[in-house]
Every structure is written in C-alpha cells, then in structure tokens.
Image (spheres, coloured by chain):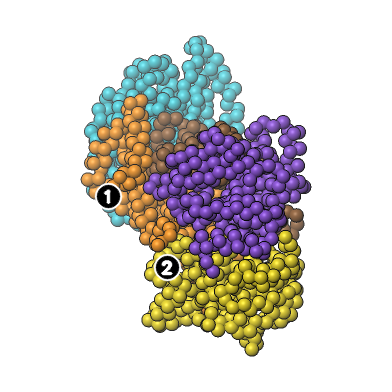
Chain colours: A orange, B brown, C yellow, D purple, E cyan
Amino acid sequence: MIRKIQKLWPFAAAVATLLLLLQVGNWVNPLIFPSVPSVFVRLYEGVAEPKFWKAVGASMYRLLIGYPIACFLGGVFGLLAGLYRGFASYLRRLIAILQSIPPITWLPFLMIIYGFGDVPIIAIVIIASFFPMAIAVMDGTEGVVRTHLEVARVLGAKKSQIVRRVYLPETLPAFMTGGQLAFGNAWRSLIAGEMFGSAMVGLGFSIRFAGEIADMSGVILYIIVIGVIATLLDQILMEQVKRRLLRWRYIAGGEGK
Amino acid sequence: MIRKIQKLWPFAAAVATLLLLLQVGNWVNPLIFPSVPSVFVRLYEGVAEPKFWKAVGASMYRLLIGYPIACFLGGVFGLLAGLYRGFASYLRRLIAILQSIPPITWLPFLMIIYGFGDVPIIAIVIIASFFPMAIAVMDGTEGVVRTHLEVARVLGAKKSQIVRRVYLPETLPAFMTGGQLAFGNAWRSLIAGEMFGSAMVGLGFSIRFAGEIADMSGVILYIIVIGVIATLLDQILMEQVKRRLLRWRYIAGGEGK
Amino acid sequence: MHTLELRNVSKRFDSLQVLDRIDLKIPQGEFAAIVGPSGCGKSTALRMLAGLETATEGDVLANGAKITGPSPERMMIFQEHGLYPWLTVEKNVAFGLELAKVPKPEAMERINAVLEKVNLKGFNHYFPSQLSGGMRQRVAIARALVMDPDILLLDEPYGALDAMTRLTMQNELIRIWQGTGKTMLLITHDIDEALYLADKVYVMSPRPGQIIHTTHYEAPRPRDRSSEEFVAYRREIMKLLGLDE
Amino acid sequence: MHTLELRNVSKRFDSLQVLDRIDLKIPQGEFAAIVGPSGCGKSTALRMLAGLETATEGDVLANGAKITGPSPERMMIFQEHGLYPWLTVEKNVAFGLELAKVPKPEAMERINAVLEKVNLKGFNHYFPSQLSGGMRQRVAIARALVMDPDILLLDEPYGALDAMTRLTMQNELIRIWQGTGKTMLLITHDIDEALYLADKVYVMSPRPGQIIHTTHYEAPRPRDRSSEEFVAYRREIMKLLGLDE
Amino acid sequence: GQNDKTSEPAASSSASAGGASEQVTHKLRLGYLNVMDDAQTILADRAGIYKSHGLDVEMHMFSSGTDLIKAIVGGQLDAGVLGFTNALSWLDKGADLKIVGGAQMGYHSMLVGENSDVTAIEQLKGKSVASQQQGSTADIVLNGVVWKQAGMERGDVVMQHVSPAVAIQSLAAGKVDGAFVFEPYASIAKQSYPVKEIYEVGQSWPFPCMVVIASGDIVKNNKEAVNRMLDAQKEAIDMLSNDAAKAASFITSDFITEDTLKKADGTTVPAESVIQASIESQVFNWKITDEDIARMDEVGQMMVDQEILKAKPDVKTALDLSWQEQQ
Ligand SMILES: Nc1ncnc2c1ncn2[C@@H]1O[C@H](COP(=O)(O)OP(=O)(O)OP(=O)(O)O)[C@@H](O)[C@H]1O
Ligand SMILES: Nc1ncnc2c1ncn2[C@@H]1O[C@H](COP(=O)(O)OP(=O)(O)OP(=O)(O)O)[C@@H](O)[C@H]1O
Ligand SMILES: [Mg+2]
Ligand SMILES: [Mg+2]
C-alpha cells in the first residue's frame, strides 16, 4: 500500500504541475486559457456526448489497424535484416533517409493516391511506426548471444528450430521496446494525420476543429484526452503485456534458495 | 578507398531504391508521380531560385535557434534529475505525459500567444526536442559508474570537481545520443510546424504549398530536399562531432603493444 | 579406440595462424585437459571438436569419422554457460530433449535425475537470473549431461567463478564423471585445476598454438594439491609456460 | 604505531547485519590480506577504511584518528579498476595530482616514474580500451601509487584476470611494495594469493562477518607455493573455510 | 503581372505625394488570405493605394481565417480581411474585436465533372463532395444554406475537407462527385479541368462573406488609421469593380506563378485573363447593409445550430460602422 503511494506520487505531482500551469495561464489570460474547474466541467459534459466517443472510436480504429500492421512489417523486416548482414546495412540506410522525412509530409501524396477517409491516416501511422520497430528488432536480432545459438546447434537444433526457439524468444524484449517506441510514433502521427488529413472524425480532427472555432477549452479538453489515452495505453497496457511476456526479466535476481 | 566504397554501397542502394520506386510510380500514374528525370530538372531549376534558398534559410534559422535551446534545457534538466533521485521520478512522469501529446497539438495555443512568424515554430521545435535530450542525459547521469565516482572521491575530488570531471565527461555520450534523437524530433516538428503553423516561408511551408496547388513534382522535390538536408546534418555533421568529442570510444580496443 | 582425434590440424583466420599442426588423441573414458596462454587457440581446437569450426588443414575425427557439424553426442559446455534466460531451469535442461522429441514422461524423469545429480533438485522452476553463478554453471552441465553424450567438451567452465566456489565445483565435476565412461576434454587457465581433474594435461605454446608437452598424472582422486607429485607437476608446467617464480 | 584499525566495528545495511564486532590492527609497513566467503563483508570493511562507508557501531581509525571520509593518504584500488575510459593512461594517472594542484612539471616527472615502475613506459597516450586487462589493472595501481599514499587498500584487484596473468601480476605487486614502507591491505578470494603476498592473513566467517582466524606467515619473498609451510597454511585456511578436499 | 508590380512604385510615390498633405503616416499590421475574396486588400497593397493614403502597412499572409483571427486576438495584428464567422467565434469567447467594414459577398461554386449527370444540388445526396475545413464559413453556409435549400442535411453527403486546389484535383481525378470552392479556384478549375458549375451560393443567397475585422484596441486608439485603411480598400474595390483588367495586372502573380495556364483541351490562356474573369465573377462591396446584417444574424443562428457557438451572438455589438456612416 505505502509502496503503491510511493510509486504514484511522481505521477500525481506531474499532473498537479500541469494543472497548475493551466490555472496560472488562466489568471494571466482567461481568453486563451480556460480555468481548471471549467475544463473539468467540459470534460464531464464531453464524455456524456456520443460525439466524443465517436471521435475516440475513430482514432482507436485507425490505431488498431495501422499499429499492428507496422509492428508486423517492422518485425519481419527487422528479423530478416538481423539475420542477413548485407540487408541490414542497406535497411539501416534506407530507414535513416526515410526517417528524416516527417511522416506527415507524405500526406499530400497519400491523399491523392488513396483518396480520403481512413486509409491515408492509417498509412501515416504505419509509416511512422514501422521504423522504430524495424530498428529495434534488427538491433535485437543482431544482439542475439552467439553462445545461445551455438548451444542450440550443439543440442541438435536445425535452422528453423533456432529461429523459432532462440531468435524469437531472445528478440522478444526488442520487439517490446520497438513496440513501445512505435506506439509513441504511431500515436503522434495518428493525431497529426487526423488534424491535417481530410478526416472528419477522430481526436485529431476534434482538436483542430476546436482550434478553428476558437474553443480553447475544447482544445485543452482534447489535449488532456489525448494525453490520458496514450498514457493509459502505453504505461498500463503495454507495460502489463511486457511484464507478462518477459516475466523472466522482472524476477528479481537473487540467490533463489 | 575500397573500404569507403564498401561503406557507401548501402547508402547508394537505398537512394537507388527510392528513385526506382518513384520511377515505377511515374509509370503507373504519371499524374501523381513525376518521373525521376523531371524531378532532377526541377531540382536543378529549384536551387537556382532565391525563393528556394529563402525557404532553406528560414528553416535553418528556426532549427538553429530552437534546437540548441532544447539541447541546453534538456541537458540541464537531465543532469539535475540524474543527480537527484526524487526529481528524476517526477521529471520522468512529467515527460511521459507530455510526450504522449504530439507537439503539433500545441500549435493553436502557440499561435495565439506568439502570433505568426518564427516563434510558434521555434517553440514547437523546442518542445519536441527537449524530451529525448532530457531523458538521454538523465539515463546517462544515473548510469555513471559508481566506481568512477568513488575513485574521484578517494583521489580527493570535491563535489564540484566530481560534477565537472566525472559526471560531465561520462555523460557526454548520453548528451550526444540525446542530441541525435533530439535532432530527429526537432527536424520532424520543424517541418510539421512550418506545414501547419502560420509560417509563410520555410521548407515545410513550401511542401504544403506545393501540395495545396497540387504540384506533385514540387512535393517530391521538397521531400528530397528535406531528406537530404536531414541526412547531411545528422549523418555527417552530428557523427563527426560525436567522433571528435568521443574519440576514446572509437579507438579500436586492441592490445596496444 | 580413440574417440577424439585432431590429426595434423592447422587453423587460420584470414592471415592469422592460430593452430599449427596439432596432434591430439583422447581415448574413450579419459579425462584430458588443455592449458596454454591466452589466445593460443585452445577454444578454437575445442570448437573444432564440437563441430562449430572447421580446420584449415588436417582432420578432426570422432570415433575415426570426420566431424562435419555439431552432434548431441559431443556436448560442449561454454564458459559463459549460455543458459537461456527466458527458460526456467527445467526448460533449459529440457531443451535438447525436446529437440530430439523425447517423450515427455521419459524426458521429465531424465531431467529430474540429472538435476539431482548436479544438486539442483527443487530448483526446476527457477529462472537463471534467480541462481548464483555456481548454480548456473551446474544447470549448464545438467543440460549437457541430460543428453547422455559420450563426450563432454568444457571450455573454461569455471573461469567466471570465484576461487572458492571453483574448488567446490571441481569436486562436483569429478563426482559427475567418475564411473560413467564418458570422455572429458577440459580447457582451463588454471594449472592446479587441470592437474586436480585430468589424467592427461596438454600444454600449448603461444600462438600459433602447438602442443609442446603432455603430462600423464594418474593419482587416484580426490587428489591432494599439496602432495609432492602434484607440486612437482605444477612446477614443471609453470616452467613450460614461462611462469617461473 | 598502528596505521589502520577497526575497533569493535559492526555494520548493518537496513536489517542486514554484515559485519559483527570486527577487530583488526595493521601496523605501518605491513602487507595484510583478508580472505573469506563471498558476501561476508570484506569489501564493506575495506570501504570503511577507505572512508567510503561508515560503521554502524565501533571506530574506524587511521593513525589513531577517526576516519571521516576518503583521503589521498589511503588509496583504494577497485576490482573493476575504475579507469576513466575518456582519459589516456597519462591523464588517468594525473587525475589525483591535478586535483591536488601539483605543478605540471613535477606531476609529469612523477607520472613517468610511476609508469616505469608498473612497466607501462611509452603507453602514456593510450586509452584504457587499447590496453589488456592486466595493463589496465597496472594503470589503476599507478594512479594510486603516484599519490604516494601511506596506505594501499586493494579489493580483489586480480579477480577479473585469468589465472596466468594473475601470477605475473602478483609478483609485480610485491616488487612495487617491497622496501617502500607502505601499508597494504588486500582482499582476495584466492587463498594461494593471500599466502603468497601477505605477512598476515585474516580469515573471515560467512555473514555476519567476523574474523575467525589470523595467519602469520613470514617467509621471505618470493615465496615457494609448493613449500611445505605454504601448503600447510593453505590446508589450514581451506579447512576453516569449509573447503576440505 | 511581375512587370506591373515592379513598375508600380513610381505611380504610388506620386500618389503618396498627394497624401503628404494628410500629415503623418500611420503604421498598420494587416493580415490577409491568399484568395480572391481578399483581392481588395492585396490590390490596395500591390497597387500602392495604402501608401497613398498615408499608411505604412505590414502585410502578413495566412493560410486560413482561423489562423489570422488568432493573430488579431493575440494582439500581433491590427486588422484583416476574413470571414466574419471567425469574428463571431471569438466574440463569443469575449475577445475584443470589431467588424468595421465590408469586403466581398459570398461566392462559392459547386462544381461537378463535365460528364456528370448531376445538375442540381439535390442529386448530390449520397455522393461525396470536397469542401473546406469544417467550421469554416464555407462549411457553415454549405450546411446551413445549400443543403437546407435542397432539403438535405449534414450526413446526407459524404464530405471531404481539403484545400480548394486539392478539392478540384480530386474532382478531376474522380475521387469525389462535387467540389465546393471559391475564387480563383473555381475559375482556374473551369479553365483547366473538365468541370462545370451547377450552383453558386452568392446568386441565391447573397451574404457578406468577407469583412474587415479590426482589434478593439486599434479602433479605440487609432481610429484614424482604421479609417484610412477602409478608404484605401474602397478605392481598391472601385478598381476591382470597374477595371478588372487593370486590377488583374497587379494581383495575378499572387495567384498564378506561370504566365499562362494550360486548359483541359491543351490550349493555353494568359494567366491574367483567368484572374480577370475570376475578379469579374466576384461581388466586392465595402458597405454592410441592413440586409447584410440580417444575413449575418442568420449565419450566427446556423453556427448555434451546428454547435459551433453556444448562444446566438448579437451581431450588432460586433459592428462599428462609423466609417461607413461617414461615406
Ligand atoms: N572467428 C574468428 N575470427 C577471427 N579470429 C578469431 C576467431 N576466433 C578466434 N580468433 C582468434 O584466434 C586466436 C585464438 O583464439 P582462441 O579463442 O582459440 O584462444 P584461446 O586459446 O581460447 O584464448 P583464451 O584463453 O583467451 O580463451 C585469437 O587471437 C583470436 O583472436
Ligand atoms: N550499499 C549496500 N546496501 C545494502 N546492502 C549492501 C550494500 N553494500 C553491501 N551490501 C550487502 O552486504 C553484504 C556484504 O557485502 P560485501 O560487498 O562487503 O561482501 P564481500 O565480502 O566483499 O563479498 P564478495 O567476496 O562477493 O565481494 C552483501 O550481502 C551485500 O549484499
Ligand atoms: Mg578460449
Ligand atoms: Mg567484495
């Protein structure tokens, strides 16, 4: 119990800081910054509206299509590159170049190629989150302990068994790291894509719309919602999955006696 | 010489792949994808125009103001957090929350507060690149080898000498890593900020303008320019600085006899 | 019958000559050891016998047949133990059996027997990170033993242990080997260890590695490290390695 | 005169009792060693003498005065050597002198002298990553020696080295110490090493650590590890540590 | 157009010589959008009319009215020409703004493909249309007037919110069935692509789309500068209405960079004539009539209906027509 509280205080302090900053902003310029209580009122009203949930749903839908595709593609490419050195140097270069181009710049193209609606945004999510996944998995695969491979060979494992029983479990932490990095990228590009793509619904669209119609407390409301959802997904869901899958990593190294 | 070529081929292959993709796109749909030769012609014409250099200049100006400020702030906060455990957990949480909010969503606010011009974009660059810098430096500071500190104490170093002579050089690699990560973020947000902020000049604005007037070869031209500049700055300039500053890291570990 | 043999073997990595016409014959059931300076090619020789490396010249034979790749008959135990951190003790030990598709009940029986042998009964569901260095090394040995190999190749298995745990582990190794008829080949830096454990100690020269001396020391076990004979052999080997006191 | 003294010292980390009423006196110029099982608190005791840790109970004294913090008089040499990878050999050795604001020409003279002493002349501008493990350890020793401390505290300085390099390094340590009048306190896992080097060997019990035995062995150096006396002392200590063969 | 612009300062300096009798020059920071709706302020600057009225203006281009209004609210700009809906949004939040004059009457065409069988708005039901960002004046009117007139409502048509250029590109590429765009995009589209106009809102429901908005601050503290700005814009509007060709010569380069425009049939037309046609299609008006105020009121109600505003704004309090009343 006390431990839980000890773990929570930095989080509480962080949230308090942000709310305080907002309130100070409100005192300085109430036109631009809504007061903290009014934001809570808006939040309370907002979540009661179906419009709000439609926005959340639309964003989640795009995320849940784009992100897994990116993870899968990134994982496959990363694994292949990790296994074949030449391909790895090539892929690293390719990614270095592509990554220096902000994903959002592809929007004009994507909109013309795929027309409107979800596809361009999903494509942006994929582009943005493919890179960190591929790189993390590549690093992970290249970092597989040589002895682990040789032990498997000595114990009689065939190539396919080595991939399945050594490479995969050993790169799992890299998959998870990549997945978390990719998630951050996916989320940021999702919101940016929704803000500036032709989407008509979604959290990014909502925030932009609020900005257009001078609804600053709406902007703050959606910034909060975006932050909360990302924090929940990343810190809680992803961390849980990670802890579950990588149980052996989180067991305190002790004498075990 | 042969070594240099061996190092260059993945880069050449990566560039070739991208050009090939573009050319294939052109064969499939010449309306959307300009042909590779036409892009080169555009590029050639483009660099001759003062407009082009004005855009490059404006972007560089914003980058060169925002990025160093972010590095400095991130470094200071990261170092402080690394030295004080409580502050570190707080800062980590704060960053986790803030980082889940895409920097571009602050644009509506920044635009009201700072109006038009460079300031909102520079602010976005700072927001985007502060985080990775602070985290990397924090990690680096927390990771300072305890023995290095104790050796210094035994040799008679005072607190301030330890910070200057152990913490600083030992976290230098973290500064560099943070700097490179921060650079990627800074660059991406710079372009996105210029695309969607009220800037009327800059590479991001140029690409957006080309997209709005459906000038696809202009979009490709600016995508290339954005990629090339980032690659040059990151891969060449940053790597060089890194190698210079961290010379001891790049000296092959050998017998030295 | 010679179960393990290096016949006039040389090895080069690019331009680096590592082994130079090595001859080595280890009969079945023998406990042999190799000592030699760092970088002289000891590991390389062992890895050839394990089938993880090929000779540039000469023949590497097991039971008279050329070795073309690894085989569960010849188990190698690595210095860094090489346990899979994501598998429990039991699963680590089961790894080879599962690859060989040994039926589950039989596998479990063999695993439990071998864990008892290395004194790790009851640790089945621990992860390697929960074990001490010595325990980990014993799991690595169990993982090899459970395959019931004819030959055990050990590459500095105790290099990472502190001097005291090491002494305990040496006695365990003897216990595990004695009376099984298994062939053992141990690489070590520690002359005492080689003499304490092995019937035959091969001494190698600095790179390019050659075998410059072979010690036959057949005192009954456990051996007394302070006995005159032991001390004399030690002094001899130290002299050969240029470690005169 | 006793230069180093632990007087009835106990140490607890939270609820973990690490040291239990330790008494220890090391006169000036003596070479003392501590052996004991892993985790018994050897490092903790040494770190107290270095001034890096405080006692929960009892007094930690140097020349009769309480130790309140580290001092260049008492140099500690760490197992992991703790060289600064971003500094060259010369700069690493110069570190303490620079802190003490020793004038440059004098510093250079002392550095070169000490590098010659540890057999590293000409390696001034190498980075630690360019050196072998043994060479790194020698730089760490040089860094301590250059401060000309009265007392050297060594925490398993050779733990990371292979057995053969270790033997060579032991002889070098003797050479460095002999005739300087410096006080040495060495922690080691290796009973041979302790007996080979030290005049006095303290044997510690498992945690909570207590000193259960003190060996006085004053044979002239270099000592013969195979001598009867040596072997007898070794056997005695092994028995105390429960390592009967 | 380029040449006209460079030869222009000579003319304007003579004009400002006349203005020298009007004592000091006033500094003014103006925002504008690069669209035909803002032709009067662009022209007033490019043709040196502001200067001749003793104004030293700083012109800042914005990509949307919502960005522009923020700069006025934030105090970085003094005035701008933009859709009055932007002003209503911010007035609702308590910002200090004044609508000080008229600029242009709403003009938005609905374009469809040349071979499309759609001939009336009603037929777009269930189809897709590209238009401007939701919440923009165009979007409010589209929902509040166009669909309503046709007996439809939001949701009956699939909307794609994109820039006007992309809207006509998409229409040309067949990705959407209709495009709701303003000038000069409608004219450019009609010249360059096989499209036709089936509806223009200004014809059936004229309303004062673009107005001159000034910060309350400048209205209070430097009314003189505001009045001069409106004088200059009035002069520009006169040129736009009476001599579109001359006006086009000043502003064409702001809209079309090439000298000629490629038509759908492969022939070319001079860029200036396209812009001239575009100007001629517009109705510029410096006056805000009572009828206009009534329309603005109606739009205010639409904004409430479309949940952009909570309460219907009182347009009258937003107006400061003292300049207009002096004319
Ligand atoms: N795959 C390889 N490629 C190139 N050189 C290699 C390779 N493996 C080993 N070597 C080189 O061969 C030499 C002998 O290596 P080996 O590992 O066999 O030495 P060793 O006797 O086991 O030394 P140590 O006692 O330090 O383990 C070393 O110089 C090493 O650098
Ligand atoms: N800072 C600390 N906080 C908590 N416990 C500590 C700390 N330092 C040491 N300990 C504990 O004190 C005990 C003794 O540690 P110490 O390092 O002195 O042992 P040691 O005799 O040097 O062992 P080894 O031979 O393995 O180095 C260990 O159980 C260790 O976990
Ligand atoms: Mg080896
Ligand atoms: Mg210790």
Q: What label does residue B63 carry, if any?
A: none
Where is mark 1, residue-wise? Answer: A53
Residue at the image point whose x is 53% and y is 18% from the top: E15
Residue at the image point whose x is 41% and y is 25% from the top: E75
Q: Can you tell which quarter of the image residue C32 is in?
A: bottom right
Whether residue E130 is visible: no
Mark 1 or 2: in front is 2
Relative to residue E51, is residue D198 drawn left or right?
right
Where is mark 2, residue-wise? Answer: C88
Name the one closer to the observer, B213 or B91: B91
Residue type at mark 2? Answer: Thr
Q: Position of residue E246 (x, y in %)?
A: 51, 31
Count of numbered tags? 2
Residue found at the far bottom of this picture: C1
Image quadrant for the N terminus of chain E? top right
Q: Position of residue D45 (x, y in %)?
A: 51, 46
Image position of A70 with respect to E48: above or below: below
Name the one closer to the observer, D233 or D103: D233
Name the one closer to the observer, E174 or A197: A197
Provide the chain ID for the residue under circle 2.
C
